[in-house]
Image: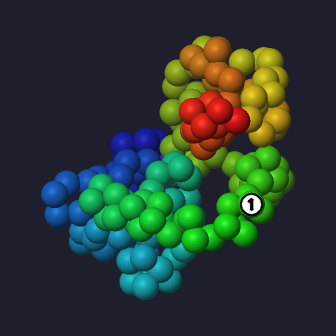
Amino acid sequence: MNVGDRDGHGRFGVLDEDADGLLCHECGRRFTHLGLHAWKGHGMTADAYRQAHGLARSRGLVDGPTRQTIADNARRGLPGKARFVAARDPAAASAARLSSGVGMSPAGLAASRSRPGRGRLGTVVVCEWCGVEFCPLAGARKRRFCSRSCASRATRARGSGR
């Protein structure tokens, strides 16, 4: 199946969002929290739903306002979770994800193959914040951090004089 082909009620590799919410590929109804609906309504985890319909792993299955509410609640609650913040290890999380063997979604693979020359550089870069090694995309030659999270932490540390 190719990106954009008919897939149930939606299109393979495309998450249809409008003012009424996100379109469920399985039943055709719209929801603000599609991951929760997939579990309760169809017995599928969010990852299984993404895989079945060719959606990127990094794509959240919640609409914009709901995503903002979840992020705001998380930001408010994080300072009270000092043990979590202290134990957080982005390098270990990346290593665990990579060792799990879960690759790119079919849509992601199709998209990366359709843009020749836009793949990964052949060089390994070490993140300036956490020290994890990564291979940046060709369009991001000057990238110094493995993630936005590490870049944000480095920026905050510079601002606090660390």
Residue 16's x, y, as percent?
Answer: 29, 53
Instruction: Tell me the crowding category of disc 1: few under 14, some 14 to 19, or many 20 or more residues within 10 angstroms, Cα based.
Output: few
Quarter holding the C terminus is top right
Residue 154's x, y, as percent?
Answer: 64, 34
Q: Is residue 15 visible to us here? A: yes
Q: Is residue 154 visible to us here? A: no
Residue visible at 79% across and 24% down in the picture: 125
Between 82 and 160, the one lying in front of the other is 160
Q: How is the image coloured?
A: rainbow
Residue 14, placed above or below residue 27: above
Residue visible at 72% across and 69% down in the picture: 83
- The answer to which image quadrant residue 32 occupies is bottom left
Between 136 and 56, the one lying in front of the other is 136
Residue 146, placed above or below residue 94: above
Q: Is 130 left or right of 61, judged from the image as shown?
A: right
Q: Is 105 left or right of 30, judged from the image as shown?
A: right
Residue 66, placed above or below residue 142: below
Going by the numbered disc 1, the residue's amino acid type is Ala
Residue visible at 60% across and 37% down in the picture: 160
Q: Is 117 left or right of 26, judged from the image as shown?
A: right
Residue 18's x, y, as percent?
Answer: 19, 54
Element class at badge 1: helix
Residue visible at 79% across and 47% down in the picture: 91
- The answer to which image quadrant residue 21 occupies is bottom left
Q: Mark 1 points at which residue?
A: 86
Between 7 and 108, the one lying in front of the other is 108
Q: Is 18 left or right of 74, judged from the image as shown?
A: left
